[in-house]
Amino acid sequence: MADLVTPGDALLRLFEETDDARALLDADGTVVLVNRSCEALLGWRRDELVGQSKAVIIPEHLRDEYARLRELLVASDSHDAIRLNLRASHRDGRELPVRLTARLIHLGDDRLVSLVLQPRAEGEGDTGFRELLDALLDGNVIVDGDGRIVMVNEQLETLFGYEEGELVDQPVEVLVPEAARGVHATLRNGFTGKARRHAMGMGNRVLGCRKDGSTFPVQVLLSSIGTEDGVLVSATVRDLSGMEELMSANDRLRGQFLATVSHELRTPLTTIMASSEMLVDSLAGVDEAARNQVEVFADRIMRAARRELTLIDDLLALTSIEASREQVSSGYADLAVVARGALTHLRDRASARGLTVELSGPDIPLLVPVHEGWLARAVGCLLDNAVKFTPSGGRVLVTLTAGDEARLEVWDSGPGIPPDEEHLVFDRLYRGQNAVADETQGAGLGLTIARSIVESAGGTLVAVPGAGGRFLLSLPFARPR
């Protein structure tokens, strides 16, 4: 951890030169860095502190307080500062009253605890764990190994509508809707003190239950706290009601935007295309040379309008997937049936270019949890990409396999994917070297749409560099919901 910051870094110089005593700890409580003001305040040299547990600068009778503070900060994952009156241990054995400001900071993928220690007057009272809990902005409940509530803070009392005396020594399931209490108890028993931090309900909607019986969505972050009497579990509870309301409003605005875009952009293009057709039809009896010239320009207008209409459809499809991923996995489809249908749809176009298109695989259903229309679009994007980049006289092979998952492979005899582009080809509007060099038409959204659909259904789509274009699609088999 210590090598994450270099001596020449401006942030390190600022950290070093500030008048306040500062220390950085990792999530496990090991000292990563101290500044010269910290050395001066506590009398310890930094080489005596860095790499050691912070317990060396903490009076023995307060070490649990500091440990709980660190665990709560890491568990809450909040950037808000907590200010407390505590004591620090001088190298000569004295206890120094300090005002402590603690904050969680992120450095890359690492979480560090920043401590700022300022001397305070001896007469100012020391803060205990009770005040520490109440200093948190989120609700917090401390639970013992049997799942019974030991302590709650003021924010949790407000959140759930209880007084602390009504909760202490009660099973923590009292804060959970009755229908979910059995499942919650099973999950609680599976959480061990070895876990440093764990978020409940990742990907699921977790509900809390107020004293009046009403429920509301929450996020729960768990962390274990070691004490002399065993391991306690700290649960930080965040109310997500406001977040869900914002997401609902965002979905409504997105829907309005999609409707507006669909109407305001598609309608003029449809009019242009219809007018081009009418223009050609109106030339009956006109000089043949003039008619041919007009037909050439009308055809250019039609092709340009179709390309723009396709681009709008792709953008709307991609936005729709991102707005509601649940709709992608709202049904079931047979990957084999969808693949054969997509091939039939593209066969005439492939034949016109002199391409050979083949399908192989077991003649068995490959049922996957994807709405058939969306799956057809994903497979269609892959086949369209293969046909587009395969030179005349080439081949397109589609292979279906059944193992732990349903798999579809699309291979073509085109130029293939350069080794440094296998991840970039899925980026929005990305045009590969081959596409630019050959002036291949397309906006670079097809593969983005295909991957978004597949990943929304819990699958994977990867590109394999090398000779010929090769894409591997994998989806889990459908299970009872």
Image (spheres, grey):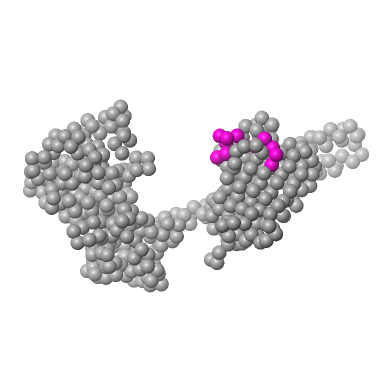
Q: Vertical placement of 475 versus 296: above or below?
A: below
In the image, residue 178 lies in the stretch drawn in magenta: no
Quadrant of the frame with the N terminus: top left
Direction from residue 64 to residue 319 in the image, left or right:
right
The residue drawn where x is 59% and y is 56% is: 403
Pick the front one: 363 or 149: 363
Q: Nearer the viewer, residue 369 or 325?
A: 369
Relative to 258, is 139 above or below? below
Q: Is residue 73 visible?
A: yes
Q: Is residue 393 left or right of residue 27?
A: right
Query: Viewed as shown, does residue 356 lie left or right of 430?
Result: right
Q: Position of residue 437 (x, y in %)?
A: 66, 30
Q: Residue at x 56, y 50 (%)?
A: 460
Magenta region, residue range: 412-423
Q: Residue at x 65, y 40 (%)?
A: 469
Q: Position of residue 259 (x, y in %)?
A: 60, 52
Task: State the residue in front, 34 or 266.
Answer: 34
